[in-house]
Image: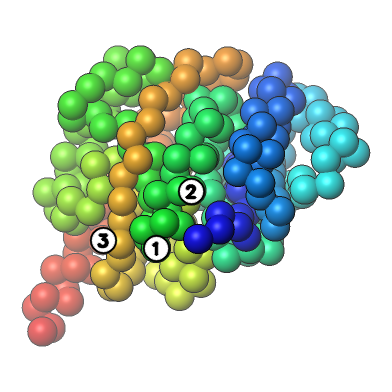
Amino acid sequence: MNIDKISVVIPILNEEKNLINLINEIKKIKRKVRLKRFEVIFVDDNSSDGTKNVIKFLIKKNNFIRYFIRKEKNKDLSKSCILGFKKSYYENIIVMDGDLQHPPRFIEHMSKKFFFNDADIVVGSRNLFNQKDPGLSLPRYYSSVIIIHFINFFLENKTSDPLSGFFIFKKKIYVKNRKKLYAKGYKILADLIYSTDEKLKILDQNIFFDTRKSGKSKMNIDVLIKLLIFILRNFLIKWKKKLLT
């Protein structure tokens, strides 16, 4: 089976120092896997640094790059991803960060597992219960482990890392469930997985985070609160459905 028809959606905010290296690494994988119908979509949460100029430079050099800017006041990674899904040309979508913590080399492994197993979603899993990922700070590691425990307890264990921001999925999952999505915060994968009633074939591909090359983490108390609201919301929806059946 050919690996083909892939849109890579990359939400970004102030990543001017990372983008050239990121695209160079993605191009290596593009050549290695021999991707033809392929695009990279940058969705910018209205960066205040030189991100716009760097992307304009990259677009001149690479005809597979597309660029969109969200000009809303509220920065929101999930909304950036959703805009990328809407604008994507292809039926298979990879989501990854723009800060080089998601190593592009794993695109090959994740794509092969996705296509060869006819999966609905392949998650780039940090496998946090079995190892401490060297790319994560201690506060981020422990907060991720605690929240994953909450998700597994209240919403079922469907993947070892529902908080991953690096995954490939079938676009039709978004199309069918877009009205059910919570669509807030920084964890769009959990939203896609737990907002559908369909039984999805979800596979994990172990990855390691690289250390952040530049910029700062988006994880903060507001992100954590939105995650907890998302868990409670989906638990109540699930509980209500059980009462009605």
- Where residue 143 sits: x, y (%)? 27, 28
Is residue 165 positioned above or below 1 on the image?
above
Q: Label 1 belongs to which residue? A: 118
> Nearer the observer, disc 3 or disc 2?
2
**Residue 242, located in which quarter of the rendered image?**
bottom left
Q: Earlier in the sequence, mark 1 or mark 3?
A: 1
- Where residue 121 sits: x, y (%)? 39, 56
Identify the residue at the far bottom of this view: 245
Q: Label 2 belongs to which residue? A: 111
Write the residue at 37% across / 45% down: 123
> Nearer the observer, disc 1 or disc 3?
1
Label 1 CA crowd tier, 10 Å (few <14, some 14–19, many 20+):
some
Give the alpha-carbon distance from disc 1 to disc 3, as whole Å. 27 Å
Q: Disc 1 residue type?
A: Asp
- Where residue 190 sits: x, y (%)? 34, 51
Using the image as rendered, state which of residue 236 and residue 148 is in the foreground: 148
Q: Is residue 22 visible?
A: no
Q: Earlier in the sequence, mark 2 or mark 1?
A: 2
Image quadrant for the C terminus?
A: bottom left
Write the residue at 81% across / 29% down: 54
User: Which secondary structure lies at badge 2?
Assistant: helix
Q: Earlier in the sequence, mark 3 or mark 2?
A: 2
Q: Label 3 belongs to which residue? A: 234
